Image: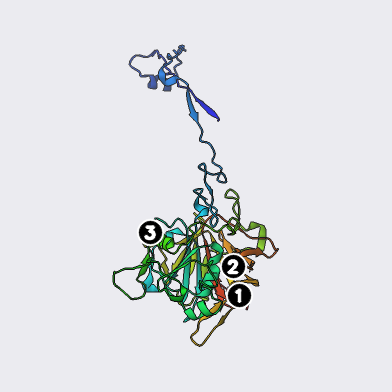
Amino acid sequence: MKKLRVAGLGILMAAVIAGCGGESATETAHTGVQFETVEKPVAAPTEASTEEVVEEPEEVDPDQPPEEGMVRDFFTNEWVAGDQNTKRPLAVMYPVNKQAQPQYGLDKVRVFYEIMEEGDMSRQMGILEDWEGLERIGNIRSIRDYFIYAALEYDPIIIHYGGPELYLYENGGLLNRNTRNDIDNINGVGGKMGSDGGAFFRVPAGSTSEHTAFTDGAHVTAAMEKLKYQATHKDSYIGEKHFQFAPIAEPNTLEKYGSEAKDAKEIDMAGSYPATKSALSYNDEDGLYYKTLYGNKQVDAETQEQLSFKNIVIQNTYYEKRDAKGYLAFRMHDTTRDGYFITGGKMIHINWKKTGDYEPTHYYDDNGEEVLFNTGRTMIFVVKAGGTFEVDGETINLKK
């Protein structure tokens, strides 16, 4: 530890002998009269002149745990309590309709998805950690099977309120207890897609209209116990390598990609999400992208804080229409598709691969190296192949 020495200063006194009667010392000095030099007395040491020791603050290494027992979060790389990574997160289905805003629990979202559904409308899914103390989560709407494929790599408890049973049950048996016992979901509608376990309530009470179904941490915990769902991650879960993160002290600025890294401050996703017109704006001061819906801030209903993200992924994904009703299918397992990675006000082209339900989706730069995410939350836009979006006013056309 370095020490700085601070010493007190003595009081300096001088005696002035004036030679001209009535002239002040100042007046005499201006007449050019010379003064006799007088030895200056030295003040006796006082308590104020006693040596003091000032300690400089120790430098904090952001890549070392601030408290004993803390670990890196699987999904954000932030320092969290040691048992955080053993607990299963929630995968909550959030509607994006105007009348459904704002919503509860968004402040606990660590990874956020937006994917199109039928009718030119999209839907969002939040991966929530540290959710047990939440007093309200939702509102909550129905799920589509491709959201399940996106969710499984986090080994979550899936929270939804219904969904098209035709595809969830008959095409692959995704939520059929006889074929996929590994999928733990809590469904407000019940039926073939699983029981609600008493997890849901309506606000206002007694309502049966859309956007009024909610749950909370206590109800979900009770439902998990009733349905005998394991609260901790499965032993086989691949969690520690979900994203590859850059050191906090050496963030990924994308500078190493040179001219291949394009400026990316304003991200407009209206070309791929025409109803919600999802967009993000970059803040240079904190390095975060702030999200909007319909041109308005997307905020957590409890905290009123706007959703913000450190990392943005635009995942170009093969899709097709299933039937005349417009239900969609997205190929969430693929090794042939590309996209873009955005962080720190810059953007690069990437390729993505996913080959198993519980395997993380991996993102690679054009050199074949896995992209390093920066510590913080991640927004993932799964978009239709051949769609468009804008970056700083320039239209980007995705490959078909």
Question: Residue 14 at what x, y percent from top left?
Answer: 42, 15
Looking at the picture, the colour scheme in use is rainbow
32 shown above or below 163: above
- Residue 33 in sight here: yes
Residue positioned 47% across, 75% down in the render? 122
Which tag is nearer the camera, tag 1 or tag 2? 2
Counting residues from the N terminus, which is met first, the one under dot 3 or under dot 2? 3
Three-letter residue code for mark 1? Leu
Residue type at numbered disc 3: Ala
Number of other residues with Cα within 10 Å of mark 1, as a class: few under 14, some 14 to 19, many 20 or more: some
Residue that badge 3 annotates = 218
Mark 1: secondary structure: loop
Which residue occupies the extreme right position in the image? Answer: 367
Q: CA distance from mark 3 to mark 1?
A: 43 Å
The disc, 1 or 2, on the residue closer to the chain's N-terminal end is 2
Q: Nearer the viewer, residue 82 or 199?
A: 199
Q: Is residue 105 above or below residue 398?
A: above
Q: Decide: marks 1, 2 in contact (CB < 8 A)? A: no
Image quadrant assignment for residue 180:
bottom right
**What residue would you read off at disc 2?**
357
- The dot on residue 398 is 1
- Based on the displayed image, in which of its 4 quarters is residue 142 positioned? bottom left
Q: Amino acid at mark 2?
A: Asp
Question: Which residue is nearer to you in this view: 232 or 9?
Answer: 232
* Picture quarter with the N terminus: top right
Position of residue 352 in the picture relative to residue 203 (left or right): right
Can residue 31 be seen in this snapshot?
no
